[in-house]
């Protein structure tokens, strides 16, 4: 696929703005460029389009993983994303700032798309934004534990007290879930990871469950409020009376496929 219209969004920090300008200078004559309002203002352009209204062939994000996750939640239709890493870790952002312009020129000649499984999240049958990395349930009061039960396809997986719970996709297995002791899962595996946060019993361990499962979480103590956080971008309060479900999202996240392999990225980013 050769893109004709390219969107660019950024974190809008100084280095990001300079990178956006360099990208525009490099490809501006070859494709139509669409900027989100914040980025357009920073680079001195009047014309802009909100991310939710962008209809582009590929979206270039300039920043860190948070920039990608924010864009994925705002996009109204599946759009391939190419992330330029201007942050400190950038596990979702595949492209370094040094190689950005060369790789973008290659993408303009044609690219392949990689699909990533997302997690559909609902509270009382109301759909929340899907999670590309993870959905996290945590206590709303620091230093207080939650008492909850996890069911997979109506079968009890775990009942425990803990600081919270992480439900991660394979993409998100290298993020919060990994830091909480969960396994690293190859992105080609169709599964979700369920990881208790600091559980108060030795037998509570991370689980890997099939992605076609329905995962339900029940808070067991009345009057104890918790927070449900999706990809660090969306937060909602939940209580014992709420019905919290997680399933495989109907639409995957789309990423421009690069030459960088998953295992090499794990070694480069996560092994000290």
Image: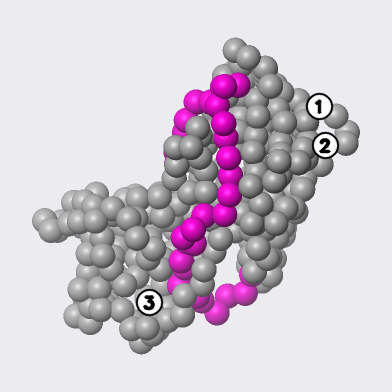
Q: Which residue is mark 2?
A: 204
Real-space Cα separation, disc 3 to disc 2, in angstroms = 45 Å
Q: Which residues are magenta?
A: 233-262
Disc 1: CA contacts within 10 A as few (<14), some (14-19) or many (>=20): some
Relative vertical location of residue 242 with respect to residue 223 in this rendering, above or below: below
- Label 2–label 1 contact, CB within 8 A: yes
Q: Residue furthest top?
A: 223
Residue 233 shown left or right of residue 228 in the figure? left
Foreground mark, 3 or 2, reads: 2
Q: Is residue 255 above or below residue 14?
A: below
- Disc nearest the viewer among 1 and 3: 1
Q: Is residue 58 left or right of residue 97?
A: left
- Residue at the left extreme? 46
Residue 37 is labelled as none
Q: Name the one closer to the observer, 262 or 272.
A: 262
Residue hosting label 3: 104
Q: Residue at x 45, y 52 (%)?
A: 69
Residue ID for mark 1: 200
Rendering coords of residue 165 (x, y %): 67, 36
Could you tell me which secondary element the residue under label 3 belongs to?
Answer: helix
Figure check: 36 above or below 179 = below
| Residue 53 visible in image | yes
Q: Residue furthest right?
A: 202
- The N terminus appears in which quarter of the rendering? bottom left
Query: What residue do we see at 34% from left, 60% from top?
Result: 77
Where residue 172 sits in the image (x, y, percent)?
60, 53
Residue 234 magenta-highlighted: yes
Residue sitting nearer the eye, 82 or 162: 162
Residue ID at (82%, 36%): 204
Q: Which residue occupies 58% across, 44% down?
A: 246
Q: Quadrant of residue 34?
A: bottom left
């Amino acid at each position: 696929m050769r893109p004709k219209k390219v969107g660019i969004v950024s974190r809008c920090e100084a280095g990001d703005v300079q990178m956006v300008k360099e990208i525009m200078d490099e490809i501006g004559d070859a494709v139509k460029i669409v900027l989100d309002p914040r980025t357009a203002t920073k680079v001195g352009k009047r014309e802009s389009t909100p991310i939710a209204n962008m209809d582009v062939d590929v979206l270039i994000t300039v920043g860190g993983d948070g920039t990608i996750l924010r864009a994925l939640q705002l996009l109204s239709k599946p759009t391939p994303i190419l992330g330029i890493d201007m942050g400190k870790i950038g596990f979702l952002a595949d492209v370094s700032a040094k190689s950005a312009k060369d790789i973008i020129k290659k993408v303009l000649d044609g690219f392949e798309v990689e699909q990533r499984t997302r997690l559909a999240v609902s509270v009382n049958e109301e759909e929340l934004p899907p999670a590309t990395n993870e959905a996290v349930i945590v206590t709303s009061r620091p230093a207080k534990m939650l008492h909850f039960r996890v069911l997979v396809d109506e079968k009890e997986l775990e009942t425990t007290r803990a600081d919270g719970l992480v439900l991660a996709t394979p993409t998100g297995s290298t993020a919060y879930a990994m830091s909480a002791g969960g396994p690293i899962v190859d992105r080609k595996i169709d599964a979700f990871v369920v990881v208790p946060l600091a559980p108060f019993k030795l037998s509570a361990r991370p689980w890997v469950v099939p992605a076609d499962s329905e995962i339900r979480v029940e808070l067991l103590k009345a009057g104890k409020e918790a927070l449900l956080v999706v990809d660090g971008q969306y937060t909602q309060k939940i209580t014992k009376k709420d019905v919290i479900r997680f399933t495989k999202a109907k639409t995957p996240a789309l990423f421009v496929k690069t030459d960088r392999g998953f295992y090499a990225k794990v070694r480069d980013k996560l092994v000290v």
